[in-house]
Image: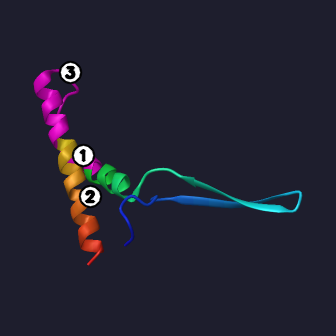
Amino acid sequence: MTNPNDPAFVETKEQADDGIHAYIVRAGLTKREYFAAMAMQGIISGMQTRAVDSAAQRKEWEGIARSAVLWADALIAELNK
């Protein structure tokens, strides 16, 4: 595994204009962001919550987001072994 901040999906395209070659690189989410999103999807898929905008609910959502990032970091650490 490489750096967790490397792009998860990289698109490269060679472009030639007037004999000059250029490479266009498009990158979106980092590997860490992608893994965290997948972990968060798994975490919340098993929950039965309502989208009620309250201070308590926001605190719970923040905890879920932190957990997802911790899961992503654990996966990256394991892949780097």
Q: CA distance from mark 2 to mark 1?
A: 17 Å
- State the SS at label 1: helix
Residue 12 lies, in percent from the top left, at: 63, 61
Extent of the magenta region: 40-63
Residue 22 lies, in percent from the top left, at: 74, 60
Furthest-bottom residue in this view: 81
Q: Residue at x 17, y 49 (%)?
A: 67
On the image, numbered disc 3 is attached to which residue?
A: 53
On the image, numbered disc 1 is attached to which residue?
A: 45
Q: Is residue 60 a member of the stretch shown in magenta? A: yes
Dot 2, crowdedness within 10 Å: few (<14), some or many (≥20)?
Answer: many
Relative to residue 71, is residue 37 drawn left or right? right
Q: Is residue 53 above or below residue 61?
A: above
Find residue 34 and report its image quarter. bottom left
Dot 3, crowdedness within 10 Å: few (<14), some or many (≥20)?
Answer: few
The first of marks 1 and 3 along the sequence is 1
- State the SS at label 2: helix
| Most foreground residue, 50 or 67 | 67
| Most foreground residue, 37 or 14 | 14
- Amino acid type at circle 2 is Ala
Relative to residue 78, is residue 6 drawn left or right? right
The first of marks 2 and 1 along the sequence is 1
Q: CA distance from mark 2 to mark 3?
A: 26 Å
- State the SS at label 3: loop
> Magenta segment, principal secondary structure?
helix
On the image, numbered disc 2 is attached to which residue?
A: 72
Q: CA distance from mark 1 to mark 3?
A: 19 Å
Q: Is residue 21 above or below residue 44?
A: below
Q: Is residue 25 a member of the stretch shown in magenta? A: no
Q: Residue at x 54, y 60 (%)?
A: 10
- Amino acid type at circle 3 is Asp
